[in-house]
Amino acid sequence: MLADWTDFAIALPTAINLLFAFAFGACAGSFIHVLVHRLPEGLSVISPPSRCPTCGYRLPWHQNIPVIGYLRLRGHCAACGVRIPSRYVWSEVGMGLLFVAAWAVLFLPRRDGFWYPVGEGWWRAQGIAHALPALAAVWCGIGALAAMTAVDAKSFLIPVAIPGWTSALAFLLWPLAAAVAQGVPEPFPMPAPPWQACVAALGGLAGLGIGRILLVAGILPRSFEDYGDYAANESDVFADYPHARREMMKEIAFVGPAVLLAGVGWVVAPHVAPTEALPAPLAAFFAVALGFLVGGAIVWALRIVATLLLDTEALGLGDVHLLACVGAVFGWKVAVAGFVLAPFAGLAWWLANSFRHAPMRMPYGPSLAVGSVAAWGMKPVVTAAVAGLLAWMATLGTSAKASPGHALILASILGVASTVAAAIARRAGGPSVAASIVLMVAGVVAWILAAPSWPAVGAGVGLGLAVACLAGSWLSGARFEEDAGPRTALSRILRLLAVVVVAVGLVLLVARPAGSALP
């Protein structure tokens, strides 16, 4: 009996913490619904208070409690009796469970636990009291990603206020977390960057500040200012805008000071290196700054390059702010990994819907959000998957080195088959488009594994794959992205990345000596 009470006493704090996490997450889910409904309409998220959209009845505080309020009202308005959509309570429950999962993977795993690499023991060693500012930063980041996903899926726009305020909180909360943390051997979740990276990040932030000042002062023009002239109405985000390349010149001018000052900081840093380690809060500030800049720079660079090549707005600026927010909250490594995983998340969604014949407009923000959450919270799963993929690639590489001719023939056949499938997809769509993508990816993989053994033949096959990729893009374009328009560019980005993979492979063939198993 005594043992039972002891077990209960040990488990009680954990149960209370989990209950608190669920309650906080449910409140976040309720607030996200407000953001999704009001921000796309340009309405205030504070006023007016929550009320029934049918009769205007203002909800008292006890009816506005997440989950409990819905259950007490039995899903109906207390004034007019209209049914409240169940999506409200499900979003609150979903966010509550998401916050519980985040708390669990951070605080519960022991050193030998499967989920230990997510938090690396720092959270458990600190305890909830000392880790609370860091936990608040993580929860704000998860909530912001959920809000941006919901708003972007609904309106194809990401209000800058969401990632902006979340990034600002990260700059405040992580240094605070470093200041109140206990000294423990486990690594701080936002480790201090190298000194050169710190100074470069400081220069980048200063450059962004200069660009912002020049923009507000009217010295630099805003990009896409005349977009409304080509839109059917104020909410139209799919207008056929003809000057995308011109607008990228404006954005290059905006980021120019940041790139320049970051480079200057990188060069100057070795000459002004400190003699002692940076204070923990300052190191955390630089870690947030580096993540913010790296996350934003990745997507902004892709946006500029892809838009210049495709002559249409490839990615929205909201996606830039989203990944910058990810870097600020979770660190630059998560931002990079999330960026890599994002196309796979988007492709999975697209393939799941490719059998439908309805137009498949899709924003890229949700893919970035899902990829980032997976890179952070599912680190052990992602690491195991990558390790398995590399082992599989090594096995295939050994076989390709033993018989490069057969592998190159296979790559050629797959490239031709991909083009044929793309031609069929022009009429059939759905499965044929999916088959075209899979065949091309398999062909490129076979070529990468075999080409270094036979550089001359590999170069010819690689050029053929590049032509096949471009031909497949053109042939399947009508089905690959119906109702084409800006901010629906996942398909274009995937096609561009396929071409880039082939182009990089050709460069590697020239740079690497013959006989290497892998480029």
Image (spheres, rainbow, N blue to C red):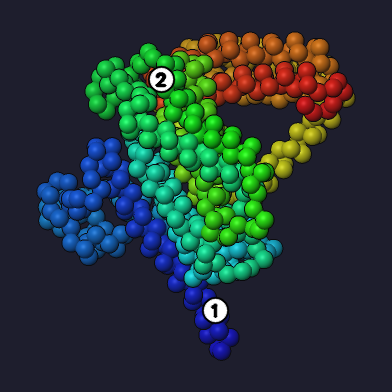
Which residue does the image show at 45% across and 25% down from the upper left? 253
Give coordinates of residue 406: x percent, y percent: 82, 18
* Furthest residue in direction front, as rendered: 271
Separation of marks 2 and 1 at Cα, in angstroms = 60 Å
Q: What residue type is labelled 2?
A: Glu
Which is more N-terminal, label 1 or label 2? 1
Mark identifier at residue 200: none
Give coordinates of residue 296: x percent, y percent: 50, 37
Which residue does the image show at 39% across and 44% down from the upper left? 164
Give coordinates of residue 30: x percent, y percent: 31, 53
Judge left or right: residue 65 versus residue 153: left
Question: Does 515 sit above or below residue 243?
Answer: below
Label 1 belongs to which residue?
10
Name the quadrant of the N terminus.
Answer: bottom right
* Furthest residue in direction bottom, as rendered: 2
Give coordinates of residue 477: x percent, y percent: 49, 14
Label 2 belongs to which residue?
247
Q: Could you say which is closer to the camera, residue 501 or residue 243?
A: 243
Which residue does the image show at 12% across and 56% down from the upper left? 79
Does residue 333 appear in the picture of this structure? no
Name the quadrant of the C terminus.
Answer: top right
